[in-house]
Amino acid sequence: MADHQEATVTLPSDPASVSAARRHVARTLTAWGLPDDAEYADTVRLIVSELATNAVQHTFGQSPTFTVDLRLERDEELYLGVTDSHPRWPQRLPAAVRQDNGRGMAIIRSLAKEYGGRLQVTPTAEGGKTVWLALPWAVPVGPR
């Protein structure tokens, strides 16, 4: 297997694009050897759903598209990033705030921690941001 594999898709900032992002990630992970029914695959699909939803809902129409990047390094680490062009970074809500939404980043942080991964937000040259997760790759190395 190559030391480095990548897959990218750019989608319109529309609610229907969240499921398209999830399908893109599912197809890519399967192509890279992860069984579609693996718990890890479910987790990565949930993470991309949350990040894509944030890119659609919290950019207030100021980011016409968002991009999902996947990168697999040496069959050891999976990088998943969602980029939008809005300058506002994700906000952590105080625990006392009671509302039905706005907990996506808390879910993502929890999943990253559970899988031994890490989360970071980086600015783009164009003034937007990328929310990145790095997760240990959960597929055994060997013949496929």
Image (spheres, grey):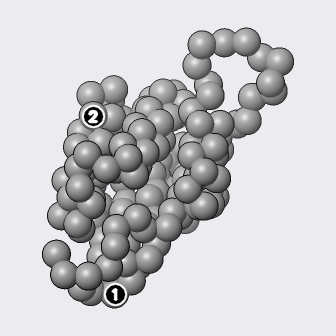
Task: Give the vertical position of 106 relative to 131 (above or below).
Answer: above
At 60% across and 51% down in the image, what residue appears? 114
Is residue 123 something that shows in the picture? no
Of badges 1 and 2, nearer the viewer stands 1
Kind of residue at badge 2 = Ser
Q: Which residue is labeled 1 in the image? A: 3
Residue 34 location (% of width, % of height): 27, 60
Between 94 and 8, which is closer to the camera in this rendering? Answer: 94
Query: Label 2 belongs to which residue?
Result: 19
* Image coordinates for residue 5, horizontal then vertical, percent: 30, 76
Mark 1 or mark 2, earlier in chain:
1
On the rendered image, what quadrant is the C terminus found in? Answer: bottom left
Question: Residue at the spot x=23%, y=66% of the render?
Answer: 33
Q: Secondary structure at mark 2?
A: helix
Query: Marks 1 and 2, how far apart in space?
Result: 29 Å
* Mark carried by residue 25: none
